[in-house]
Amino acid sequence: MVLAVTAGPAGDRQVVGQARGMVHRHPDQPTELYIDNLGVTPGRRRERLATKMLDELVAWGVELGCEEAWVGTEPDNEAARGLYAKRGAEAEAFVMFAYELSG
């Protein structure tokens, strides 16, 4: 997990961004890095925090021998789509299945 942390007005530390990466080692596919939950608090957007966190996770994936990285976002999330495209990712068709779990 990568965090963007800043000092608050009282000197306390506040998390203003986060991203998580998980390495998937498959028996029949190349090792890949899955990037999850990349987000920045609204008041701190447009400060390149998401770019820095994304770059940090990608560098970590390279260090661990991942051959590719992937991340998903909603079709209407233009900011995320712009960030990923700007950092060299290409959009792909993807089908997601969701299970409703009750317990």
Image (spheres, helix red, strand yellow):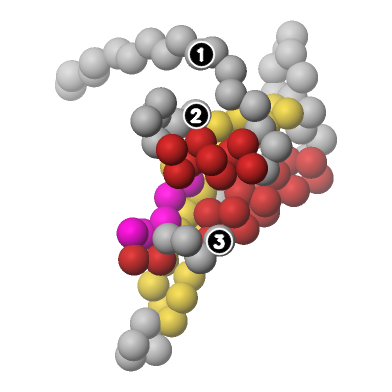
Quick one: 19 or 41, which is closer to the camera? Answer: 41
Image point (62%, 58%), residue name: 52
Q: Residue furthest bottom?
A: 10
Relative to 17, say whether 32 is above or below.
Answer: above
Q: Residue at x 61, y 49 (%)?
A: 54
The residue nearer to you, when weighing 40 against 30, is: 40
62 displayed left or right of 34: right
Answer few, some or many: residues within 10 Å of disc 3's Cα (few below 14, many 20 plus, some between 14 and 19). few
Separation of disc 2 and disc 1 at Cα? 9 Å
Q: Is residue 69 visible?
A: yes
Q: Tell me, yes or no, whether the two marked residues, 2 and 3, touch with CB atoms within 8 Å.
A: no
User: Is residue 22 visible from the viewing direction of this image?
Assistant: no
Is 88 on the left-hand or right-hand side of 10?
Answer: right
* Contact between labelled residues 1 and 3, with CB atoms less than 8 Å apart: no
| Residue pointed to by mark 3 | 48
Residue 15 horizontal/vertical position (percent)? 41, 66
The C terminus appears in which quarter of the rendering?
A: top left
Residue 76 location, x and y as percent? 37, 30
Q: Compared with residue 71, is residue 42 higher up or lower down, i.e. above or below?
A: below
Report the span colored magenta: 38-42
Q: Is residue 74 magenta?
A: no
Q: Secondary structure at mark 3?
A: loop
Q: Which residue is mark 2?
A: 72
Q: Which residue does the numbered mark 1 point to in the structure image?
A: 94
Q: Are marks 2 and 1 in contact (CB under 8 Å)?
A: yes
- The mark that comes first in sequence, 3 or 1, is 3
Q: Earlier in the sequence, mark 2 or mark 1?
A: 2
| Secondary structure predominantly adopted by residues drawn in magenta | strand
Nearest the viewer among 93 and 63 is 93
